[in-house]
Amino acid sequence: MGYFHNDRNLEQILAPITLIRGGSSRGFYFQGADVPEPGKGLEEFLLAVRGSPDPMGMDGLGGNTILQSKTAIVSPSSRPNADVDYTFVQIFPDQPATVTYKMNCGNISAGVPVFALMKNMLPHVPDGSLTVRAFSTNTKKMMYMTLDVLNGEARVDGTTSIGGVPGTGAEILIDFRDQGGGFTGATFPTGNLVDTVTMSDGTSIDVTIMDMVNICGFFNAADFGIGCTGLELPAPDGSIIAPPGMLTRLTELRLKIAELIGWDQYTIDTIGKATLPFAVSVAPPADYTDLDGNPVAAASMDLAARFYLECAT
């Protein structure tokens, strides 16, 4: 199997790896033939690549946030409607032996066609716009990535910018139209467009729960209470600059969302370590300052949405 053979000192394994930044995340990209099959062997391998259990990843390629601890495994697809098969694996720097296949990442998905072109998985590609069809093994559903190609490779130079990422680059568009219900079997897992969650303080929050790429609970920032604006941003250390009590309230809301979709394995003390479900605030257009310190005008948007990676009691 690829580089995993028995004529070497098995204290070390040679395996080709490519690092690609997709959007605001950085990931380890592998060809499927060069890594173990999904399971314990693959998980141990990926944890070693990152450098777990050290939170800084000093003995590997590092990444002390989940944005830098992601993996894509890509292979040519035998399916007639797909060009490649793609498996996403999330590693958790603060949880030494934990990975999950039960989520997806749009940022890392953007790097999939780039990697596939680099590894000649898509032969005889003409210059210009190209849509790559990828079968997600995480959700068993299709996704589509459109990018510009020159001389058989993905264009790199471009004018597209992303908040929190230096410089500009070529645009890659991700189409998730077939991804609804990938983890629960229904785009709206509860069967409702809106559910009302009663919080421990007796207040209620309306939430729309959707299984679309990931499982998210959308709520109106104005109805959340305790001064939430929907414009909260991370501090330099990665924590959220938020009103007092907001993170505790977000943690409780995420637990309530999990319970509504039948995920009963979490408690108020453990949901903060789970990535899904995401809590996402939605607010009307408003002026704000982005991660790079640049002003953003309300007139440039239709709404403001924020999802919160950090929730803690």
Image (spheres, helix red, strand yellow):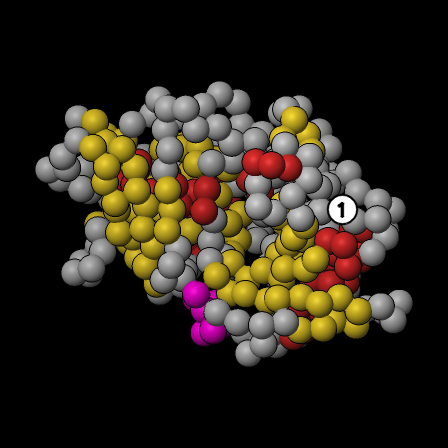
Report the residue at 22% width, 56% height from top. 82
**Coordinates of residue 162 in the picture (x, y in percent):** 51, 31
**Coordinates of residue 277 in the picture (x, y in percent):** 61, 61
* Outermost residue, left side: 124
Report the residue at 63% width, 24% height from top. 294
Viewer-proximal residue, 254 or 174?
A: 174
Report the residue at 84% width, 48% height from top. 227
- The question of residue 163 being in magenta is answered with no
Q: Residues within 10 Å of mark 1 (few under 14, many from 20)?
A: many
Q: Disc count in the image?
A: 1
Viewer-proximal residue, 80 or 89?
A: 80
Residue 298, by quadrant, is top right
* Outermost residue, front side: 299
- Left or right, 15 with reference to 55: left
Question: Is 43 located above or below residue 17 in the figure?
Answer: below
Which secondary structure type mostly characterizes the magenta part of the structure? loop
Write down the residue under mark 1. 229
- Left or right, 269 with reference to 265: right
Is residue 139 visible to us here?
A: yes
Question: Is 39 located above or below residue 73 in the figure?
Answer: below
Is residue 51 visible to us here?
A: no
Q: Secondary structure at mark 1?
A: loop
- Which residues fall within the magenta stretch? 180-186
- Left or right, 199 with reference to 138: right
Residue type at numbered disc 1: Thr
**Coordinates of residue 193 in the picture (x, y in percent):** 58, 72
Report the residue at 71% width, 47% height from top. 230
**Coordinates of residue 80 in the picture (x, y in percent):** 16, 60
- The question of residue 183 being in magenta is answered with yes
Quadrant of the rendering where the C terminus is positioned:
bottom right
Residue 58, by quadrant, is top right
